[in-house]
């Protein structure tokens, strides 16, 4: 390292060549770990999605190559699981995203007392990580059959089935909108006062300010984060499993059923479902990364 | 801020630009009363958020109080040896995860910054993969890969623990890498390296006595985030059949009435502590993104 900086200009090209050939060794442990415990297992799972695993273990056809698992994904039951997952993720991403944005804006720019801002950010940090089994239980105890709030909302004429999509969406929102708050707050901070003042000096209305300045600047962040929220809900399993007792038909639970179910399960279909999910998540995260990069232009 | 509250008008924003150009500018005198109206709207938004946040917690607390005498649900839980055992197990796994993750990530991020900047996007891509491959898929991939020969890890207790730590280390990649990379940006890696090497330090000494201590704050923030995710994680622990805290809460939820409410609140308190410590540290560092990963 130090030797390289002291070497004269125009040193024989062999030297840098050799240096580069050894430098990559430094990342080998990390890459090996990722290969062993992340990439290879996922690829091996992918290979299973092309195998016939629906027959008995001793059947010679077991493990033979097939596209059947992917063809099966059009079965109403399996297709429905995708539709339900997409619907739930979309609803919670949009509602959570909109509300999270409003909440962050209220605290940062809405003229509310200063101390609410750090309080909201800390709450959001906790709530966005408060998920899975305890979250599902908290909603069951509050809105479930014998929940604390249930008699009151029933008296209002509202009957919420805790095993329904709506209940699941309500529970997901509990970690969705705080995540929106956390990610969008820096973007809102990035809206500089001068821009607003400059636009007002030039006679722009509040609407024009939002239409031509603030919204275009915030749009990549807003869209990117909503997409991230979509992925966040799409990959969730524990909350849904606990809340519905495994009864709700969404992709993550359908995968569980196909790979680990007691009856009528087919791991091959489970692996194919999983691959479909990886594709959707991949598109989601790529879109998020792209939009986030655009958004960072305006943040310092 | 003058003019009507911006969100009174936000829905209009989807209308055509032509309509916007024709819209008359707001008369200035209208500014004061509408600002107050805007503030009312923000208070309402805040109140809804506040209620949404606290109602499930208050509901859970009230539910746990239905067991007589008061607080007996908590007493039962704390007396349950399984509670302490699973919590201790998950905590221990969390600590091991953080150590392994630090040992993997710090030298890698350091090396990439110092010598292989061109590989940075690829390394970053690998660290973001856990978002593309959710826990449910990761655990089935691990089970399929390590259930039989040549690496039958899932067959033994120790092997399953190894798989659990490995899976959690993978889950921690995005947070740890981001935290460490941000930390490295703040220190002058090149000068530190050259200074310590000219004083005769080897790579090991450099990493352990210079780089790690300088990344203390970043590592701690990555660590608390990892801990918050790992200690109630359910999906991976369940399918690896580990005696962890998440599966314990779930099991309790199926068998008991009031105790699960108590455990849920305790678990919430633990998340709160981890995040509180994180935000204390965060005042010194700039941790931008906190994305939860164990839903």
Image: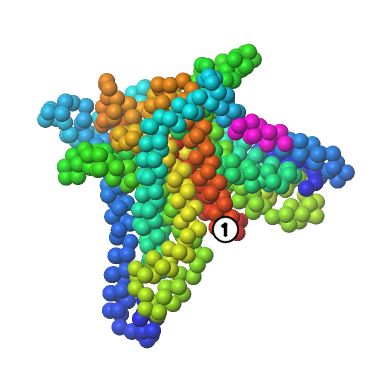
Magenta span contains residue B267: no
Residue at screen point 45% across, 69% down? B189
Q: Nearer the viewer, residue B69 or A288?
A: B69
The quadrant the C terminus of chain B occupies is top left
Q: Is residue A27 left or right of residue B29?
A: left
Residue B184's place in the image compared with B158, above or below, is below
What is the chief secondary structure element of the magenta stretch? helix
Q: Residue furthest right?
A: B29
Residue B199 seen from this side: yes
Total marks in image: 1
Q: Residue furthest bottom?
A: A8
Range covered by the magenta-colored residues: B43-54
Is B50 included in the stretch rendered in magenta? Answer: yes
Residue B3 falls left or right of residue B193: right
Which residue is denoted by mark 1 in the rendering? Answer: B284
Residue positioned 35% across, 81% down in the render: A3
Question: In the rendered image, is residue B118 in sight?
Answer: no
| Label 1: how many Cα within 10 Å (few below 14, some 14–19, many 20+) | few
Q: Check the image and report above or below for B97 versus A79.
A: below
Q: Is residue B230 above or below residue B78?
A: below
Residue B209: percent from the left, percent from the top? 41, 68
Picture quarter containing residue B134? Answer: top left
Question: Residue A182, position in %: x, y?
Answer: 57, 45
Report the front residue among B11 and A60. A60
As drawn, A93 above or below B253: below
Give the x, y percent position of residue B207.
Answer: 39, 66
Q: At 59% from the left edge and 55% from the top edge, which residue is drawn? A: B283
User: What's the chain of the residue with tag 1?
Assistant: B
* Residue shown at the point (71%, 33%) measured from the top left: B44
Label 1 sits on a secondary structure element that is loop
**Residue A54 drawn at (x, y percent):** 21, 27
């Amino acid at each position: 390292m130090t030797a390289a900086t002291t070497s004269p200009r125009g040193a024989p090209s062999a030297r840098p060549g050799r240096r580069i050939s050894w430098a990559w060794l430094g990342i080998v442990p990390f890459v090996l770990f990722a290969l062993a415990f992340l990439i290879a297992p996922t690829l091996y799972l992918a290979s299973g999605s092309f195998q016939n695993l629906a027959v008995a273990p001793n059947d010679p056809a077991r493990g033979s190559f097939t596209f059947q698992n992917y063809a099966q994904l059009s079965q109403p039951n399996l297709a429905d699981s995708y539709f339900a997952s997409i619907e739930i993720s979309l609803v919670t991403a949009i509602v959570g995203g909109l509300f999270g944005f409003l909440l962050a804006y209220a605290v940062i720019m809405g003229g509310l007392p200063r101390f609410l801002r750090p309080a909201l950010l800390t709450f959001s940090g906790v709530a966005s990580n408060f998920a899975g089994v305890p979250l599902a239980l908290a909603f069951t105890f509050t809105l479930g059959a014998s929940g604390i709030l249930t008699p009151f909302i029933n008296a209002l004429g509202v009957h919420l089935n805790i095993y329904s999509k709506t209940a699941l969406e309500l529970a997901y929102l509990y970690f969705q909108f705080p995540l929106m708050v956390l990610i969008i707050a820096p973007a809102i901070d990035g809206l500089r006062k001068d821009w607003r003042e400059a636009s007002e000096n030039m006679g722009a209305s509040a609407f024009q300010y939002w239409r031509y300045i603030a919204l275009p600047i915030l749009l990549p962040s807003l869209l990117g984060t909503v997409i991230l929220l979509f992925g966040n809900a799409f990959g969730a399993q524990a909350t849904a499993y606990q809340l519905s007792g495994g009864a709700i038909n969404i992709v993550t639970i359908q995968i569980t059923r196909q790979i680990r179910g007691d009856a009528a399960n087919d791991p091959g279909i489970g692996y194919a479902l999983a691959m479909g999910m990886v594709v959707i998540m991949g598109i989601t995260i790529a879109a998020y990364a792209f939009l986030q990069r655009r958004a960072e232009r305006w943040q310092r | 801020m003058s003019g009507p509250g911006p969100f009174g008008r936000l829905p209009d924003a989807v209308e055509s630009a032509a309509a916007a150009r024709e819209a008359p500018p707001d008369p200035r005198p209208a500014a004061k009363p509408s600002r107050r109206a805007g503030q009312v709207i923000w208070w309402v938004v805040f109140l809804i958020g506040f209620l949404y946040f606290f109602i499930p917690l208050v509901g859970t607390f009230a539910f746990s109080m239905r067991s007589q005498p008061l607080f007996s649900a908590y007493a039962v839980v704390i007396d349950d040896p399984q509670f302490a055992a699973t919590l201790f197990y998950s905590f221990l796994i969390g600590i091991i995860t953080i150590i392994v993750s630090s040992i993997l990530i710090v030298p890698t991020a350091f090396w990439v910054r110092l010598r292989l900047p061109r590989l940075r996007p690829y390394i970053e891509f690998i660290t973001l993969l856990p978002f593309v491959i959710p826990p449910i898929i990761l655990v089935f991939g691990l089970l399929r890969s390590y259930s039989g020969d040549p690496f039958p890890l899932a067959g033994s207790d120790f092997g399953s623990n190894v798989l659990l730590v490995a899976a959690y280390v993978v889950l921690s990649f995005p947070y740890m890498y981001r935290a460490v990379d941000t930390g490295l940006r703040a220190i002058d890696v090149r000068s530190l390296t050259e200074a310590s090497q000219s004083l005769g330090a080897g790579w090991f000494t450099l990493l352990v006595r210079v780089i790690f201590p300088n990344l203390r704050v970043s590592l701690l923030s990555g660590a608390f985030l990892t801990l918050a995710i790992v200690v109630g994680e359910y999906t991976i622990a369940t399918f690896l059949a580990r005696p962890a805290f998440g599966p314990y809460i779930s099991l309790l939820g199926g068998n008991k009435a009031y105790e699960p409410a108590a455990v849920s609140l305790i678990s919430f308190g633990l998340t709160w502590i981890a995040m509180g410590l994180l935000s204390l540290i965060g005042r010194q560092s700039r941790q931008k993104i906190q994305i939860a990963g164990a839903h």
